[in-house]
């Protein structure tokens, strides 16, 4: 199987998304989850939920990156690539808007996910055009 340029774009979008997700998970755990869960005033249920909810986006972006890489290197049809691209692209778009708005552009996450989103759009272009 020969990979097309659009497949390479999806593969790179997945690698960017997965890499940023791993870094995000480590920093979120260190800078947000650990201080919040160290609060003994909070109930154990709240501490567990806080950790899970703060890492949800990490899990979502990591899984999305893996899905993009999978559809890029397998011989799935254009409908599968479109479905995965739209689902992961919407997640990346939320990351771009949320990070840009929340940090007023002073967070590298929005720029990295914007690059990933652009690669997804380019990678899907051959499937929808």
Image: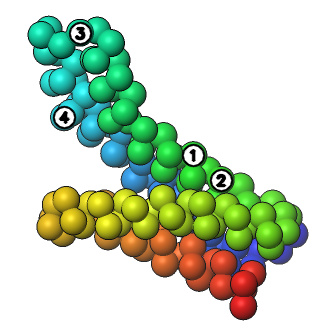
Residue 100 image offset from top left, x and y in percent: 24, 67
Q: Residues within 10 Å of mark 3 (few under 14, many from 20)?
A: few
Reading the image, the residue beneath label 3 is 43
Question: How far is the residue under mark 4 from the one under mark 2?
Answer: 28 Å
**Which residue is at 64% across, 77% downward?**
123
Question: How far is the residue under mark 4 from the one under mark 1?
Answer: 22 Å
**Which residue is at 61% across, 50% downward?**
66
Question: How far is the residue under mark 1 from the one under mark 3?
Answer: 30 Å
Give SS at disc 2: helix
Reading the image, the residue beneath label 1 is 63
Q: Are marks 1 and 2 in contact (CB under 8 Å)?
A: yes
Question: How far is the residue under mark 3 from the one under mark 2?
Answer: 36 Å
Q: Residues within 10 Å of mark 4 (few under 14, many from 20)?
A: few
Q: Residues within 10 Å of mark 1 (few under 14, many from 20)?
A: some
Point out the tag, 1 or 3, that comes first from the N-terminus.
Answer: 3
Q: Quadrant of the N terminus?
A: bottom right
The reply to whether residue 36 is visible in this rendering is yes
Reading the image, the residue beneath label 2 is 67
Reading the image, the residue beneath label 4 is 31
Nearer the camera: disc 3 or disc 2: 3
Point out the tag, 3 or 2, that comes first from the N-terminus.
Answer: 3
Give SS at disc 1: helix
Residue 7 image offset from top left, x and y in percent: 70, 73
Residue 70 image offset from top left, x and y in percent: 71, 55
Please, which residue is most extreme toward the bottom here? Answer: 129
């Amino acid at each position: 199987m020969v990979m097309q340029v659009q497949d390479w774009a999806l593969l790179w979008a997945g690698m960017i998304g997965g890499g940023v997700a791993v870094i995000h998970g480590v920093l979120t755990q260190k800078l947000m989850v650990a201080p919040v869960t160290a609060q003994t005033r909070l109930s154990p249920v709240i501490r567990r939920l806080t950790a899970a909810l703060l890492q949800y986006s990490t899990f979502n972006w990591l899984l999305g990156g893996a899905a993009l890489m999978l559809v890029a290197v397998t011989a799935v049809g254009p409908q599968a690539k479109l479905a995965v691209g739209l689902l992961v692209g919407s997640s990346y778009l939320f990351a771009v808007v949320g990070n840009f708005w929340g940090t007023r552009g002073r967070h590298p996450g929005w720029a990295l996910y914007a690059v990933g989103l652009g690669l997804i759009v380019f990678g899907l272009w051959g499937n929808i055009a």
